[in-house]
Image: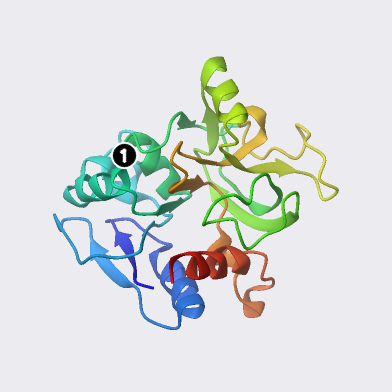
Amino acid sequence: MKACVIVFPGSNCDRDLQVALRRAMGSEPAMVWHGDATFDDVDLIAVPGGFSYGDYLRAGAMAAKSPVMREVVRRANKGVPVIGLCNGFQILTESGLLPGALMRNANLKYVCKDVHLKVETTDTPFTRGYDKGAIIRIPVAHHDGNYFADDDLLDDLESRNQVAFRYTDADGQVTSAANPNGSQHNIAGILNRQRNVLGMMPHPERLADPALGGTDGTPLFRGMVEAFA
C-alpha cells in the first residue's frame, strides 16, 4: 500500500498522521506539500488536522483552494480513497468533496478532550476494522467542529448510510450532553455517496499507540491497510 499525507502551512497533525500510517503500513507515507500541483500515484490520500493557513477567512477555506487540492479532488472523483481528519474534514467540505459545513462550536469555545463515538457503518474501507455499533474513545481538538446541513441533506445522509461516526456517551447513548460541539444528529464523521471519501472531526491518529494512552484509533488504520493492500 502507498499513501501520502498532504501538508499545509499551519498543519500540526501531519506528523502524527504520518506515524500512524507508518505503523499500520510498515512503510513510509509520502509527505506532499500544499503547493505541489501533482504527486505520485498512491492508494490513499490523507488530509491532516491542524490550522491550515491559520484558519484565516474560514477553517479550511484557503487550503481548499491550494494547488494540491485540485489534484486531490480530481483523484477522489476518480475513486482514489481520501480521508480528512479534523481540519482535513473542514478542507474536504470546503473543497466540495463532502457535503455540509463545519461551523463554530455551539459553545463558541475550543474543545480538547476525549469523546466517545459510535461506529455507524462498517461498509467502508475506512471503518471495516471495527464492529458495527462499537463504542470507541477518540480525542477531539477543534474550535469549528459543529457539523451543519439542511434537513434534506441530513435525511439523505441518514438514508444512504453515510454517517460513519456519531458522538455518544460511554454507554452508546446519543445525547446532547455527549455532543462536544453542537453537530446536528451528533454527527462526528461522514462519507461521500461513493464511500471513498471520509471526513471526521475526532483524531484517531492520537489514540493509535499504547504509548498515547489507547489504541481505539488503530483499527481504522489497520483496516485501511487491509482494504488497500
The colour scheme used here is rainbow
Give the residue at x 28% y 41%: 64
**Residue 182 placement (x, y as % from top left):** 63, 31
**Residue 205 placement (x, y as % from top left):** 53, 65
Give the residue at x 26% y 50%: 75
Task: Say how many tags the image has.
Answer: 1
**Residue 13 placement (x, y as % from top left):** 43, 62
Residue placed furthest toward the right: 171
Residue 56: quadrant of the picture? top left
| Left or right, residue 97 beside residue 186 | left
Residue 1: quadrant of the picture? bottom left
Please tell me how crowded label 1 is: few (under 14), some (14-19), or many (20+) other residues with Cα within 10 Å.
few
| Left or right, residue 174 beside residue 152 | right
> At numbered mark 1, what does the secondary structure look like: helix, strand or loop?
loop
Instruction: Look at the image and tell me whether residue 150 can be seen.
Output: no
Instruction: Look at the image and tell me whether residue 1 can be seen.
Output: yes
Can you say whether 69 is above or below 6 in the image? above
On the rendered image, what quadrant is the C terminus found in? bottom left
Can you say whether 104 is above or below 221 in the image? above
Q: Amino acid at mark 1?
A: Tyr
**Residue underneath mark 1:** 56
Could you say which is closer to the camera, residue 17 or residue 72?
A: 72
Give the residue at x 57% y 51%: 202
Residue placed furthest toward the bottom: 26
Residue 57: quadrant of the picture? top left
Give the residue at x 35% y 73%: 29
**Residue 39 placement (x, y as % from top left):** 19, 63
Can you say whether 5 is above or below 185 in the image? below
